[in-house]
Image: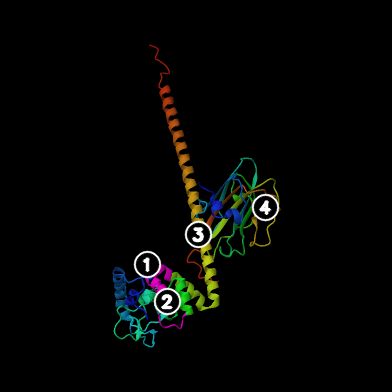
């Protein structure tokens, strides 16, 4: 009786609505594929990853969004979601570097708690211009998708990340 | 005040509910054993003298001449060793309480006794002597036995949080809720990862099996093919 890790990890719920997976998304940091729900250190995710998309095989374009829903801390996510990366017009079976980097990649540097870092893949119906938001925090993936008519996501993957060393100190109430 | 010999002489109607009347020989022996253990520890705390009682001597003979009702109701762990030494000026602080309680021993009065005992004691707080009316619930308190350590501990923490400062209880509550949420997140994280790994494993096993079958087939085809090529392609013309 297995369920979806995205549901169990509350990605579907906090950031996304339930969707049907219709493409394969592979994210590779330093040539190592990210397993859904695994934990990576900030030192391992400093540079942007390699992204491989496998979908219908036609000449469709994809938009990739990377957000942190647990900013600044999972128990107090006042800045949900923090936008780390936004790339559009990615052709299939090509790397994200072939697309338009609207918002450049920001290395995750969580200070408090264990953060989820989520990659969401949308299929673009047309080649469209997407404008960068004014700031990275309080990004809303749902609103973003609605704004640009992106339909439901086609794939999503997430990993966990916490401070490199230590716990970040005691939190006061 | 009261004593076991006194309870012995209770009328028979109380004897019918004999479970509450304590002093039958086997129970007395176990109580004595318990008190002997306490006395071994209590003697170490004799010099602390945190417990002071001075009461007018009652006419009735009792093994606890200096004990007030509240002390008795504090529980069997609170009692001084039985039979008590000849002169008892101060009651030693019972060590199990000290070991288990989180706050100073002075604050501690009631140790998870049944509610009826508490209400009775509140109404008769000035009542030094025990009379027959109290005998029924006293005997039931006696038979309650030592309160469980977990009950004491939970009672401890509850009492402490409300007596320190008014805001401390809320802070404790908030902290508890936050901790619970954090624990729930941690469990969810762990579960999500496990599910992912399990699905990956099953997927890889399937792929592996499929690839192995393909491999076998290819090997077989290859063998067949090589056999068929081992035919003479031409014969020498002589």
Question: For the residues marked 2 and 1, what is the alpha-carbon distance in whole angstroms?
Answer: 18 Å
Question: For the residues marked 3 and 4, what is the alpha-carbon distance in whole angstroms?
Answer: 29 Å
Q: In this orientation, does residue A41 appear?
A: no
Q: Residue at x 29, y 75 (%)?
A: B36
Question: For the residues marked 3 and 2, what is the alpha-carbon distance in whole angstroms?
Answer: 53 Å
Question: For the residues marked 1 and 4, what is the alpha-carbon distance in whole angstroms?
Answer: 79 Å
Q: Are marks 2 and 4 on the same chain?
A: no
Look at the numbered disc 4 and give the secondary structure of its residue. Answer: helix
> Which chain does tag 4 point to?
A
Q: Which residues are magenta?
A: B124-152
Look at the numbered disc 2 and give the secondary structure of its residue. Answer: helix
B44 versus B184 height, above or below = below
A131 vs B95, left or right, is right
Q: How many marks?
A: 4
Look at the numbered disc 3 and give the secondary structure of its residue. Answer: helix
Q: Are marks 3 and 4 on the same chain?
A: no
B12 versus B49 height, above or below = above
> Which chain does tag 2 point to?
B
- Residue under label 3: B186
**In this rendering, the label closer to the viewer, 1 or 4:** 1
- Residue under label 1: B16
Comes first in the chain, label 3 or label 2:
2
Q: In this orientation, does residue B39 appear?
A: yes
Q: Are marks 1 and 4 on the same chain?
A: no
């Amino acid at each position: 009786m297995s369920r979806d890790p995205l549901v169990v990890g509350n990605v579907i719920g906090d950031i996304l609505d339930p969707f049907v997976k219709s493409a394969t998304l592979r994210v590779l940091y330093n040539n190592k594929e990210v397993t859904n729900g695994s934990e990576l250190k900030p030192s391992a995710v400093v540079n942007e990853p390699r992204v491989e998309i496998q979908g219908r095989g036609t000449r469709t374009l994809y938009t990739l969004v990377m957000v942190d829903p647990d900013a600044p801390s999972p128990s107090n996510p006042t800045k949900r979601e923090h936008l780390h990366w936004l790339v559009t017009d990615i052709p299939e079976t090509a790397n994200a570097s072939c697309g338009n980097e609207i918002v450049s990649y920001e290395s995750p540097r969580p200070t408090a708690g264990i953060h989820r870092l989520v990659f969401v893949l949308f299929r673009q119906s047309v080649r469209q211009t997407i404008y960068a938001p004014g700031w990275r925090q309080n990004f809303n993936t749902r609103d973003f998708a609605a704004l640009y008519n992106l339909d439901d996501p086609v794939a999503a993957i997430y990993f966990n990340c916490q401070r490199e060393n230590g716990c970040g100190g005691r939190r006061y109430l | 005040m009261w004593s076991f010999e006194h309870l012995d002489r209770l009328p028979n109607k109380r004897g019918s509910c004999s479970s509450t009347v304590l002093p039958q020989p086997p129970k007395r022996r176990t109580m004595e054993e318990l008190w002997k253990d306490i006395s071994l520890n209590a003697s170490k705390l004799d010099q602390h003298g945190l417990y002071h009682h001075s009461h007018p001597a009652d006419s009735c003979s009792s093994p606890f001449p200096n004990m007030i009702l509240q002390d008795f109701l504090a529980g069997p762990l609170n009692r001084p060793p039985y039979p008590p030494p000849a002169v008892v000026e101060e009651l030693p602080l019972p060590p199990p309480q000290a070991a288990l309680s989180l706050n100073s021993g002075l604050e501690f009065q009631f140790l998870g006794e049944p509610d009826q005992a508490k209400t009775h004691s509140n109404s008769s707080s000035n009542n030094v002597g025990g009379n027959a009316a109290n005998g029924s619930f006293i005997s039931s308190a006696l038979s309650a036995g030592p309160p469980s350590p977990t009950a004491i501990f939970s009672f401890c923490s509850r009492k402490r949080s409300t007596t320190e400062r008014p805001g401390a209880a809320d802070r404790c509550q908030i902290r508890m809720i936050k901790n619970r949420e954090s624990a729930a997140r941690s469990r969810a994280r762990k579960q999500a990862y496990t599910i992912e790994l399990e699905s990956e494993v099953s997927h890889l096993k399937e792929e592996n099996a499929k690839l192995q079958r393909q491999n076998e087939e290819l090997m077989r085809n290859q063998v067949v093919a090589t056999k068929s090529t081992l035919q003479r392609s031409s014969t020498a013309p002589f």
